[in-house]
Amino acid sequence: MANQTAVDVEREVREADARRVAALLANDIDAVDRLFADELTYVHSNGNLDTKETFLNGLRSGASRYLAMEMSDVDVRAYGSVAVLTAKFTARVRVGGDREVNPTPRVLAVYVKRDGRWQMTAWQSTTLPPA
């Protein structure tokens, strides 16, 4: 880790987050499981809180299904083996099996590097005011 530059960390975290987006869109639960830390805290823009287990269970059961997702205005700040990612997030998500929501929050994600790979440990999204 000592030999990594902030540029290296930023690239790696952006790549890890891109893998997260791709895994969610593919509903690849095993890949999402590897990208999320066991102690994940995931706060949705509506204020609901998920753990890693409850988030994955929602994907498995079909209670939530990501149909489209895009990250923009992405910024990554490195702090050794921890990185903070901020961005705008737009998505189409099927929830409850049949209702579609289109969140467009600003997000903050915390990634930690363990055993040579970046995992998300926290996600916080805040609904943006109407434009």
Image: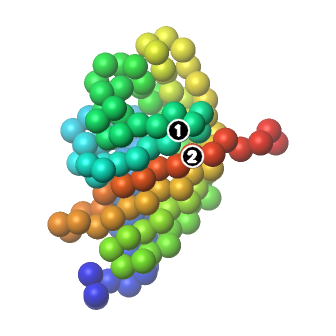
Residue visible at 44% across and 13% down in the picture:
97
First-in-chain label (1 vs 2) = 1
Residue with the mark numbered 1: 44
**Mark 1 Cα within 10 Å, few/some/many (few <14, many 20+)?**
some
Q: Marks 1 and 2: CB-CB under 8 Å?
A: yes
| Label 1 SS | loop
The tally of labels here is: 2
What residue does disc 2 label? Answer: 125
Residue 92 located left or right of residue 120: right
**Three-letter code for the amino acid on which mark 2 is drawn:** Ser
Seen in the image, is 42 located left or right of residue 44? left
Above or below 22: residue 87? below
Residue 109 appearing in the image: yes
- Percent across and percent down for residue 81 are 33, 74
Mark 1 → mark 2, Cα distance in angstroms: 6 Å
Q: Residue furthest right?
A: 131
In the picture, residue 42 is in which quadrant? top left
What x and y, as percent, mark residue 15?
Answer: 37, 60
In the rendered image, residue 38, in percent from the top left (x then y), is placed at: 26, 49
User: What is the residue that sits farthest to the left in this orientation?
Assistant: 115
Residue at horizontal 44 percent and vertical 75 percent from the top: 78
In the displayed structure, does residue 5 sit left or right of residue 90?
left
The image position of residue 128, as x and y in percent, is 71, 44
Residue drawn at the location 50% of the way across and 42% of the way down: 43
Name which quarter of the figure residue 104 lies in.
top right
Task: Indicate the quadrant containing the N terminus: top left, top right, bottom left or bottom right.
Answer: bottom left
Instruction: Say what secondary structure mark 2 lies in.
Output: strand
Q: Nearer the viewer, residue 122 or 98?
A: 122
The colour scheme of the drawn protein is rainbow
| Amino acid marked by disc 1 | His
> In the picture, which quadrant includes the C terminus?
top right
